[in-house]
Image (cartoon, rainbow, N blue to C red):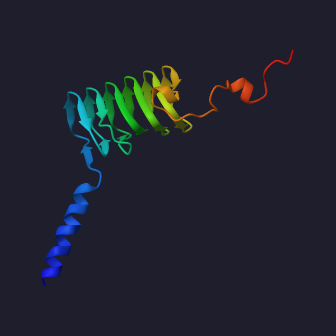
């Protein structure tokens, strides 16, 4: 009888430590910057910048009808709606088939599905800027592939 109460207390504390999920629903408009941790799902409209707290598992998801008018800075993002502003993802970004990004995209790893659109620059983040190193230290891509001119 008492053990059941003890177990429920332990389960409650485990649930609190799991990442938080935040939803901005279809009929919601947020004006101002958002600072979050865990998962942020945007089905409505955000007029302001979005910043993930320094947590490696944080992710922003912009749904098909979702729009963001501002900058996004998060480790990971999945975009299937409209983003008007620069996007910075230190880990991974996925652009689904209906994604439109009007701004520069700073990424470490990128996945683009046929139909997605980027109206801006694609900028790869180097290890010094917070991204994972993709090439061996000190070697240029041309040298690594053996494409350097042999003179």
Q: Is residue 70 left or right of residue 2?
A: right
Residue 49 % position (x, y): 28, 27
> Which residue is at a point 38% across and 40% down the rendered structure image?
64
The answer to whether residue 113 is above or below residue 124 is: below
| Residue lying at 46% horizontally and 38% vertically, measured from the top left | 91
Q: Residue at x 25, y 46 (%)?
A: 22
The image quadrant that residue 48 belongs to is top left
Most foreground residue, 80 or 86? 86
Q: Nearer the viewer, residue 32 or 109?
A: 109
Q: Is residue 21 above or below residue 84?
A: below
Left or right of residue 132, residue 51 in this image:
left
Pinpoint residue 151: horizontal percent, then vertical percent.
87, 14
Residue sticking out furthest to the top = 151
Q: Is residue 116 visible?
A: no
Q: Residue pushed farthest right?
A: 151
Please indicate, yes or no, whether residue 71 appears anywhere in the rendered image. Answer: yes
Tell me the quadrant of the picture where the N terminus can be found.
bottom left
Name the residue nearer the viewer: 137 or 54. 137
Residue 76's spot in the image, x, y percent?
42, 39
Question: Which residue is at a point 44% across and 34% down the rendered structure image?
Answer: 90
């Amino acid at each position: 009888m008492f053990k059941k109460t003890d177990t429920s207390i332990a389960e409650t504390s485990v649930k609190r430590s799991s990442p938080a999920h935040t939803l901005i629903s279809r009929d919601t408009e947020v004006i101002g910057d958002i600072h979050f941790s865990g998962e942020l799902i945007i089905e409505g409209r955000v007029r302001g910048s979005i910043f993930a707290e320094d947590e490696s598992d944080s992710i922003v998801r912009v749904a098909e009808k979702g729009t963001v008018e501002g900058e996004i800075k998060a480790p990971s993002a999945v975009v299937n709606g409209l983003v008007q502003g620069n996007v910075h993802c230190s880990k991974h970004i996925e652009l689904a088939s209906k994604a439109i990004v009007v701004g520069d995209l700073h990424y470490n790893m990128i996945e683009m599905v046929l139909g997605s659109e980027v109206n801006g620059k694609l900028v790869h983040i180097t290890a010094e800027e917070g991204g994972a190193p993709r090439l061996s230290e000190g070697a240029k891509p041309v040298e690594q592939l053996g494409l350097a001119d042999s003179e």
